[in-house]
Image: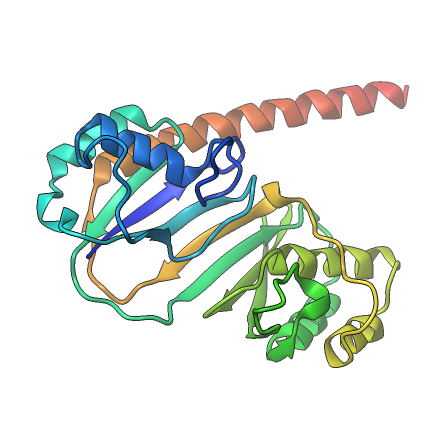
Amino acid sequence: MLALRVAYDGHPYHGSQRQPHHPTIEGELLRAFWKTSFLPMDEVPSLFRFASRTDKGVSARENILFIGGHTGSLFKHNELQRMTKYLEDIWITGYTTMPYHPPYIKEYHYHLGIEDYPIPLLNELCTIFSDTHDFSLFCRRRESKSPYRTLSMTFRMEHGDTCLIFRGPGFLWQMCRRIASAFYKVREGAIHIDDVVAMLREPHGHKMPPAPASQLLLYSVGVNAPFHDFSPARKKMRDYYEKKANASLARYHVSLDVLNGTER
C-alpha cells in the first residue's frame, strides 16, 4: 500500500471526498494521476481514501491519502515532479510504502480571529471539552456512528488570533466547527459555560450550529511511518501561502482604511 502526504487549500473545493458533479481534492488528484499515467485513465484503486475527511472549504497542512494495489512500487520522485505541474492548490509533500496501523492521532486547528479572548474562559472551556464525551449536540452525525469521542483541547494566542487546537483519534462530522461555535457564543454571552456542560452530560435538545469552515485547518495526521520528503512541493506551497497572506493583509488594511474614514 502507498500513502501520500497531501496538503491543500480547501476553499475552492467541495471537500476531500469524491463527488460526481463538484470539484474535490480526491477528484483533482485522480485527474493528475491519469494525466501523468501514474494510474490508467479512469481507473480508481479499490482503496483510495484520506485518513481524515474534510468538509467543503476546510484546508489541510497535512492529510494522508491511502492508495491500494501495486502503485507503491511505481511511485518515484520524477512522477511527483510531473504531478506538481497539474496541481495548483494541492501539494503532495511526501510518500511512504512502509506499513502503518491505526488509530491515527489527528490534529485540527480552528482560528477564531479574536485577539482578546479571556484566557481563564479559554482554559475552562478547553478543560470541559477535553475528555470522552457524547458529542451528539456538537456534530452532524449519521445514526450508525457512535457519538462518543475522546478529545484533547488546548489553545494558543499569537498574531492577533486565538487558535483552538483539537487532538484525538477520531472526529465526528462538523465536530470541531460546532465546538468552536460554542467558544464564540460563550464569549458573546449568548450561552453560559453551564449550558455547555449540560449539552455534554445530557445531549438532548438543539444542536450547536457550526462555525465557518474556512477557519478550520487539518494540521496533521500522526501516521507512525517514515515519509520520503518532496521539497519542491513544499516550496510551491510556501510560495502560494505567502502570496495569499500578503493579499489578505493588504485587504485587511483596506478595510481598516474604510473603517477609519467612517469615524471622521
In which image quadrant can residue 66 be found? bottom left
Q: Can you give x and y, in whole percent of width and height, for residue 131 in the image?
A: 60, 79
Relative depth, front residue between 184 and 155: 184
Relative to 146, residue 230 above or below: above
> Is 236 placed above or below 228 here?
above
Is 41 rendered above or below residue 136?
Answer: above
Instruction: Name the image quarter holding the N terminus.
Output: bottom left
Q: Quadrant of residue 51?
A: bottom left
Can the viewer see residue 122?
yes
Q: How many marks?
A: 0
Residue displayed at 49% across by 38% down? 10
Spot occupied by residue 240 in the image (x, y as percentages of width and height):
40, 29
Query: In the image, is residue 9 above or below residue 70?
Result: above
Q: Is 91 positioned to the left or the right of 166 in the image?
A: left
Seen at 51% across and 32% down, the residue is 22
* Residue found at x 76% / y 75%: 203
Q: Residue at x 56, y 41 (%)?
A: 56
Location of the C terminus (image quadrant): top right
Residue 25 drawn at (x, y percent): 42, 38
In the displayed image of the protein, which residue is found farthest to the left? 73
Pick the front one: 252 or 60: 60
How was the colour assigned to the protein in this rendering?
Answer: rainbow
Whether residue 159 appears in this view of the structure is: no
Report the side of 51 relative to 96 (left or right).
right
Image coordinates of residue 19 in percent, x first then y, are: 48, 39
Front position in the image: 133 or 155: 133
